[in-house]
Image: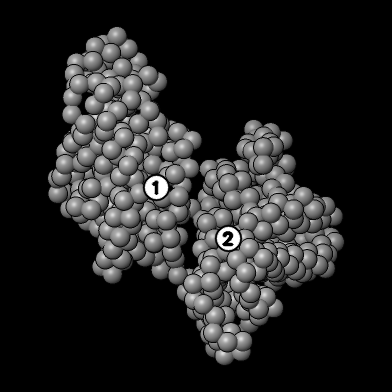
Amino acid sequence: MLQNQSDEVSGFGKEVDNKKIILPEKQIQDTKGNGVLNGTGNGFNGNGISAQVMDILLATPSKLPEREYVFVKNIISFSIFVLSDILALFSAYALMKFVFGVSFDFLMSAVIFSFFAFVGHLYQKRFPFWDEIAKVLKVSVVAGISYHFVSTYSIGKTSILWTSVFWALSAFLVIVFRNITKELSWILGLRKKAVIIGAGLGGLKILRTLDMERGLGYDIIGFLDDDKTKQFKPVGKFRGKDVLVIGKTCEIWNIIEETKIDEVILAIPSLGDKALTALASHLQKFVPSVAIVPDMFGLPVNIDLNHSFGEQTIFLSVKNNLANPFNRLLKELFDKILSIIILFLILPVIVIIAVLIKIDSPGPIIFSHERVGKGGRRFKCYKFRTMYVNNEEILKEYLAKHPEYLEVYLNTAKIPGRDPRVTRVGRILRKFSLDELPQIFNVIKGDMSLVGPRAQPPHEVQTCAEYYLEWSKYIKPGITGLAQVMGRANISHIDKNIISLWYMKNWSIWLDIVIILKTIKVVLKAEGAY
């Protein structure tokens, strides 16, 4: 099945500007006489490359996979998403005409939207759910502005209000239709078949990511891994089904020949840069796509990729978004404007809750406690009172009777299950995070943000000072945040600070909007609440 290609690689290279350029896989193949292949028996060659990797580099499939099916599949996928967008725009056009009695030029709107969607790569590739929503909204705004100016000169002036309504409705329907189209594509078999090489931590993280982002269209057929204890055993789940280790890494050629793989995902950063680069360079000649998972988890996602043709080098530029003063000003304006709007909307709810608290148990309505904010500044953080006034005495008695909860309390400052300190109304408020509504006044005062790290008491700051000192230079604590929507009460203090650092480096207005929307979902489902 495999053809040895060692005879082809000797002396491979060419002179370019007096520099010898050698493909990475050829460079390593030329070392085949060293190490394990030379009888040393240590499992590695002179470059530290394992025998399993060398087996892949020294072989090719006996029969190259057909590439025509990839082209056909891409054309079909391209076409159905164009059709999906056109149907969404036609639905918006029909609703505007027959419900509101306002007519638009459907053909012009479809052409303009499709053009900008093509420019934005919405037909050429798939994006994660929230990224695609952001792209659709951007395309809709640009298309709407373009349509307004073009239609003004071609069919006469159109109302800006109705034009805005039409394009807002179009954007919503495009998002809905696209998600339906993705599910239909999966059912019809328009999937991106992929195999993951490496069933370690990196491989499992990628599997979970692709399972959460099902709209990307991946179909994971299995893992390849050289760990004998994992062979033909399930190591994770994808779309509710077990994903098995289906063989060793050297069996990749069998997989490529038999299953028409669309992508190989390399999740084995332990190989080292040289071996990983060689493996990717070699495999990409035989599969449509090769993805590399570097050991860089936690790095900001807003990375600029730069390259140099002459030196065959690439380098990544990493940014800290909230270190930029302009971005901090933008976030401050966003917080102030949105918090004032929210206050007017929730004011009746605040009044009703205040009355219920007063009726339920004696004590103040608002509980204020000291928190540490931006730059170490301390402030009074407002919450609705959810505990009895003598809650400290109740806590001591409870922990004395239930010492098994002491460690959980020290790590999270929460008591799992039914907390005896919490009042009847307090349980409901905590379950849906309604006790935090008064913090909207902290945002208006400038103590907090709508979205940001959790506001920490002084004693917690001391336990994770190195993380706190890094993020607190740039951002204020938030009513909600990335850590809250990821696990609310189930995440330790240190993990929350690590997540806060990631949020700070990747901040954008869109990220804040996404977190606010996710917060609504998490709160309504009462996920991770005590």
Q: Mark yes or no: residue 464 visible.
A: no
Q: Kindly identify which residue carries mark 2.
A: 172
Q: Kindly identify which residue carries mark 1.
A: 482
Q: In the visual, does 386 lie left or right of 368? A: right
Q: How is the image coloured?
A: one colour
Residue that appears at 58% across and 87% down: 156
Closer to us: 291 or 419 = 419
Residue 356, position as x, y percentages in the image:
30, 28
Q: Mark yes or no: residue 362 visible.
A: yes
Sequence order check: which comes first, mark 2 or mark 1? 2
Considering only vertical position in the picture, is 292 above or below 8? above
Residue flagged by tag 2: what amino acid is it? Phe
Residue 421, position as x, y percentages in the image:
27, 20
Mark 1 crowd level (few <14, some 14–19, many ≥20, 10 Å Cα): many
Residue that appears at 30% across and 39% down: 350
Considering only vertical position in the picture, is 280 above or below 406? below
Which label sits in the foreground, 2 or 1?
A: 2
Quarter residue 479 falls in: top left
